[in-house]
Image (spheres, grey):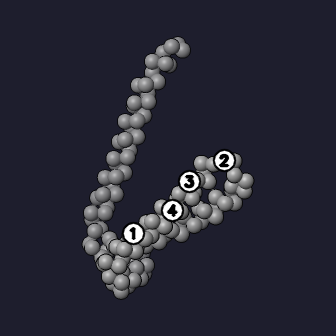
Amino acid sequence: MNAKRAAKLMQIAHYYGEEKQVCKLMEELGEATSAASEVLMLLSYHEQGGKKRDLTARLEHLAGELADVVNVTEQIIQLFGLETDFKVARHAGIQKTLKRIREEEQANETRDEPAWRNFQ
């Protein structure tokens, strides 16, 4: 994170304090969830007229809500000294997901293999 932005975020975090910023994080996560739900609805229902324009507006809204989540998340990480824990958890989450993908791909290959043999 750039130093000027980090200083501004910490000014906000220290002004409001730990409890209010944890509440703010919960609020922002809820708003981001709602915005993501709106995007998903538009992606799921192809028959809607004007979908592309509506989707663009919903994606812009989602981007704004995600920016709020990231800003407050960075404040929480700094307020509670979670930098190392956050980096470790983030790395572990990526590795866990990649492992799950490999396992799913292997399961799909194994499941599809007998059917493929029938075509040979």
How far from the left and from the top, in percent, is residue 14?
Answer: 33, 84
**Residue 46 tag number:** 2
Tell me which numbered mark, 3 or 2, is placed earlier along the sequence: 3
Q: CA distance from mark 4 to mark 2?
A: 20 Å
Disc 4 target residue? 34
> Left of 82 or right of it: where is 36?
right
Residue type highlighted by circle 2: His
Q: Residue at x 30, y 78 (%)?
A: 18
Q: Residue at x 39, y 69 (%)?
A: 26
Badge 4 crowding class, 10 Å Cα cut-off, few under 14, some 14 to 19, many 20 or more, is some
Badge 3 crowding class, 10 Å Cα cut-off, few under 14, some 14 to 19, many 20 or more, is few
Tell me which numbered mark, 1 or 2, is placed earlier along the sequence: 1
Q: Secondary structure at mark 1?
A: helix
Disc 1 target residue? 26
Query: 16 or 102, which is in the foreground?
Result: 16
Badge 1 crowding class, 10 Å Cα cut-off, few under 14, some 14 to 19, many 20 or more, is some
Task: Using the rendered image of the protein, determine whether residue 26 is visible from the camera's viewpoint.
Answer: yes
Q: Secondary structure at mark 2?
A: loop
Q: CA distance from mark 3 to mark 2?
A: 11 Å
How far from the left and from the top, in percent, is residue 82?
Answer: 28, 68
Query: In the rendered image, which quarter is residue 75 located in?
Result: bottom left
Q: CA distance from mark 4 to mark 1?
A: 12 Å
Residue type highlighted by circle 1: Met
Tell me which numbered mark, 3 or 1, is placed earlier along the sequence: 1
Q: CA distance from mark 1 to mark 2?
A: 32 Å
Disc 3 target residue? 40
How far from the left and from the top, in percent, is residue 68?
Answer: 47, 72
